[in-house]
Amino acid sequence: MSPTAPPSVRDPSSGPNHGAPPAPGGGAPLLALRSVRAGYGGIDVCFGVDLTVPAGSVVALLGPNGAGKTTTLRVAAGLLPPSAGEVRLCGRRVNGAAPEDLARAGLCLIPEGRGVFPNLTVRENLRMMTYSGRSLADIEAVTFERFPRLRDRRRQVAGTLSGGEQQMLAMARGLATDPALLLLDELSMGLAPIIVEELYGIVAGIAREGMAILVVEQFARTVLGVADWAAIMVHGRIKHAGTPAELGDELSAAYLGGSST
Ligand code: ATP
């Protein structure tokens, strides 16, 4: 790792912190964005975002279309440099760090749209993750325990899986790198509510193992069932933050629509 590479977050000094707000008084949070501005072609779409993900917590970033949620995740993952503010991983400033270095340090982004190789089988998709040093047998064992449905589908071409199964495969590929911090973008996109619930049940299980998770969603209600903390972003700014219970009323407000299930 280069001298400027980010710190590893695989063994964070702070322990699991479920239920704590993302401004813990103890050890450094896994991820902290401070007054982050970011955008495209010199035009900012995020205007001073503050967001913290403590170790062992699930934080939900919610908001309507175009609010800047994905942009925020891209900044956190090193895919987009902030135009101002700072990104801290385990207390160390990582502005400008390459996405590969952040990934090596324990950060994993599952992008919107799933990120699987549609022409490869489930097994081949998993085999690609052996670059991380784990054997295929090990990756498959963990994957099939978490996602039993993928066991039956292991010889199937990924592009022919259902949307939910593709999302499971995308998560399995990300989890194969054994990340400390998982960034999930719109897990629920295009999926039936019952599948979304199943996926969030799996997310809750992963969080119980101690992984920190930042999840972006428009589809608010299900994620709130597993989140310790949530923030609502509108027009590039965090408008409200609190526990899911505290944000209930805000989520009923018109900009998220009253129909979120
Ligand atoms: P959604 O829920 O629809 O994915 P979002 O909250 O994730 O929305 P972003 O994708 O972060 O929002 O987009 C924020 C703003 O930045 C939008 O106005 C969008 O059009 C713009 N934007 C996003 N990506 C680009 C890009 N590559 N080039 C230019 N503008 C972009």
Image (cartoon, helix red, strand yellow):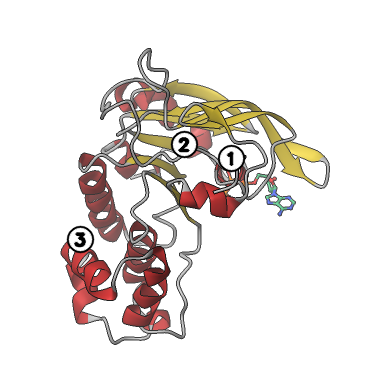
Q: On the image, which quarter does residue 242 sit in?
A: top left
Three-letter code for the amino acid on which mark 1 is drawn:
Thr
Which comes sooner in the sequence, label 1 or label 2? 2
* Residue depicted at x 24% and y 44%: 204
- Residues under labels 3 and 2: Cα distance? 24 Å
Q: Measured from the top left, where is residue 16 in percent x and y?
A: 26, 30
Q: Which residue is mark 2?
A: 61
Three-letter code for the amino acid on which mark 2 is drawn:
Leu
Image check: 110 left or right of 3? Answer: left
Three-letter code for the amino acid on which mark 3 is drawn:
Arg
Dot 3: element: helix
* Residue depicted at x 67% and y 46%: 80
Q: Is mark 3 within 8 Å of ligand 1?
A: no
Of badges 1 and 2, the one in the foreground is 1
Image check: 142 left or right of 241? Answer: left
Dot 2: element: strand
Q: Are marks 1 and 2 in contact (CB under 8 Å)?
A: yes
Dot 1: element: helix
Q: Which residue is mark 1?
A: 72
Q: Which residue is mark 3?
A: 146
Q: Is mark 1 within 8 Å of ligand 1?
A: yes
